[in-house]
Image (cartoon, rainbow, N blue to C red):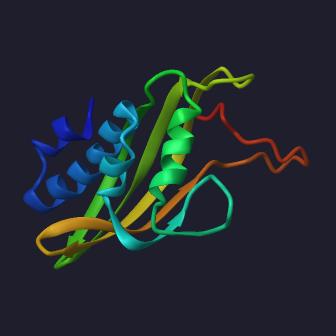
Amino acid sequence: MSTATVAAHAPIGEAAILAVIDTMREALFTKDPHKFISAFSTDAAVFNLAPPLMHHGVDPAEKQAWFDSWSTPLELEPREFKVTVSGDYAFAHGFLRLSGTKKGPEGKVNFWMRETVCLHKQNHKWRIVHEHTSVPFYMDGSLHPAFDLRP
């Protein structure tokens, strides 16, 4: 179920935040870097899976290069998002499942990650000002990502 479907049954503020997450989902599926970037403030603090430790905003060329590394559309499934809205600020956290097929030896990819976004309403539109994405890893000395976990 897309966040758009969930958003249709959510309170107005929550629905608007879930719609931003749905914009990200749609942009990944169509591999549209500009649509993806439209969800973010230009100076957003982005802590995603790719190095470096922090990005400032989303670079369209970098996002397009990442999209080009996939041979299929990217599926993004949001689940269990909790949203809090207070005035012109909001935050949401939940899980995202990313799946698709990479070009090269990786092949099919399918894993869950944790997602937290903080948003600010700017010119009557919600934009992500802080994103933190993470994948847990096993603390058994292997440091392997826990791609087998499911919500």
Residue 151 seen in this snapshot: no
Name the foreground residue: 107 vs 10.
Answer: 107
The image position of residue 10, as x and y in percent, is 13, 49
Answer with the quarter of the image where residue 44 lies: bottom left
User: Would you say residue 129 is visible in this rendering?
Assistant: yes
Residue at figure coordinates x 45%, y 45% from the top left: 95
- Outermost residue, bottom direction? 87
Give the answer, above or below, for where 87 lies relative to 17.
below
User: x and y percent of residue 54 in the render?
Assistant: 60, 69
Whole-percent x and y of residue 113? 54, 44
Q: Quadrant of the N terminus?
A: top left
Seen in the picture, residue 145 relative to 53 is either above or below; the reply is above
Is 88 positioned to the left or the right of 66 in the image?
left
Classify residue 131 as left or right of residue 4. right
The location of residue 122, given as percent across then percent down, is 20, 75
Residue at left offset 50%, top offset 37%: 67
Number of labelled discs?
0
